[in-house]
Amino acid sequence: MNRLLVKNLAEIVTPLGKTALRGKAMQDVKVYKNAAVYCENGIIKLVGIDEQVLSKLDGITDIQVLDAQGKCAVPGFIDPHTHFLFGGTRADEFISRLEGIPYMELLKRGGGIVSTMRQTRLMTETELYNTGKKTLENMLRQGFTTIEGKSGYGLDRNTELKMLRTMKKLRKDMPVTLKTTFLGAHAVPPEFADRSTDYIDFIIEQVLPIIKEENLAEFCDVFCEKNVFTIDEAKKLLLAAKKAGMKLKIHADEIVSTGGGSLAVEIGAISADHLLSVTDADIEKLAVSDTTAVLLPMTAFCMRKEFAPARKMIDKGCIVALASDFNPGSCYSYAAPFMLALAVISMHMTINEALTAITLNAAAAVDAADVIGSIESGKKADILLLSKPDYRFLVYLTGINIVEHVIKDGKIIF
Ligand code: NIG
Ligand code: FE
């Protein structure tokens, strides 16, 4: 039996529940002062006031004890939208974008996602594994104990499978919960130039069945955007994926509003992501649905775009989560404190809402709010110990990583 007690905490701060918090309820985080948390075999058993937790442990021996004086505990962060696995980088394009060349223009010129596709196709599985491992280690340092990763830089059968198989290996080897998403419809590859619908059919007929057979991805996603995949193409693919038993996600309304938000609601997607250009009508639909709106503030910042209307979405009753979108193009960052600062300072979310959005609601965005995302009895013991006694320092100490210890599945990783 693996027993861990974290005692003497200045505070434990967490949203509560096994489902996402919607709208104003995102504000309702629980704060325990002078607190302790006790875990057995990777599961949280007791949470509460220090003396009360300790009194219940009388007679139990063989407990690893961590004295966390002056520290605060929050749930492990969850990043429900990343493209963390890829070959090469695109610094030149980053500079071009800063000089004014639009993101979609670079893609049109054969750069962008297609440039990373070329570099990823050339990688061996071992090379891909090694770069992915480094990234996951670094993300763990930021406090991310659960990470979603997408394919989408292969855009052919073998490379898409190579990406997903590599993630399957990483999941086994790394102390993070890795959720995998098939994003074969990330861009139209050169082999299918001007034949996006044929490419969708190719994915449905030739790639999806293998992914199912090898159980390589829990989710299917699509980049639904003007000049990439239309609403109809997205719908065709996602319905095929649903039929194959997969859960759905959509890159929706990122650059141009094409109705990706409503499509997500219509087909019962777990999440609609980006939503920089979401319409008021689609916000209303999201607000009465169980689809989580995953907002990616660092992408908006890096693309010099208006942020998604987080305040409006929360006030209307949407389930809002935050994610990094880490990728070599639109957002080459997984800096959790920066993301939280943008959410609170620029998008006008409260600190409590941002905490809920990066924990319990982010868990919902990977369909796992019943097992992760909060510090309460029965959940996985994924816990961060912050170097400050007050969780508000997550944003107040702007852009600085204050994660001092990461506990994953009840084990102190560092
Ligand atoms: O979510 N927009 C599409 N996909 C990514 C960017 C991928 C890339 O540029 O490599 C995104 O922003
Ligand atoms: Fe993305």
Image (spheres, helix red, strand yellow):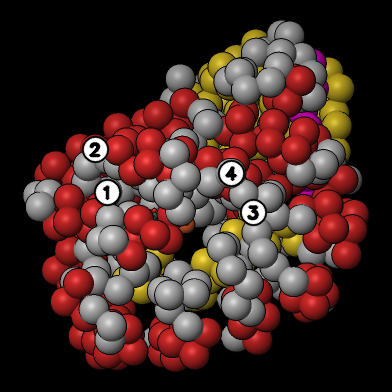
Q: Which residues are magenta?
A: 9-17
Q: Secondary structure at mark 3?
A: strand
Q: Please say if the residues under marks 1 and 3 sit with CB atoms less than 8 Å apart.
A: no
Q: Quadrant of residue 131?
A: top left
Q: Residue at x 40, y 64 (%)?
A: 181
Q: Amino acid at mark 2?
A: Thr
Q: Please say if the residues under marks 4 and 3 sit with CB atoms less than 8 Å apart.
A: no
- Viewer-nearest of discs 4 and 3: 4
Task: Please tell me which of labels 4 and 2 falls first in the chain.
Answer: 2
Q: Amino acid at mark 1?
A: Phe
Visible in this render: residue 248?
yes
Q: Which one is in front, 33 or 88?
A: 88
Measured Cα–Cα span from mark 2 to mark 3: 26 Å
Q: Please say if the residues under marks 4 and 1 sit with CB atoms less than 8 Å apart.
A: no
Task: Please tell me which of labels 4 and 1 falls first in the chain.
Answer: 1
Q: Which mark is residue 86?
A: 1
For label 3, the residue is 295
Task: Please tell me which of labels 4 and 3 falls first in the chain.
Answer: 3
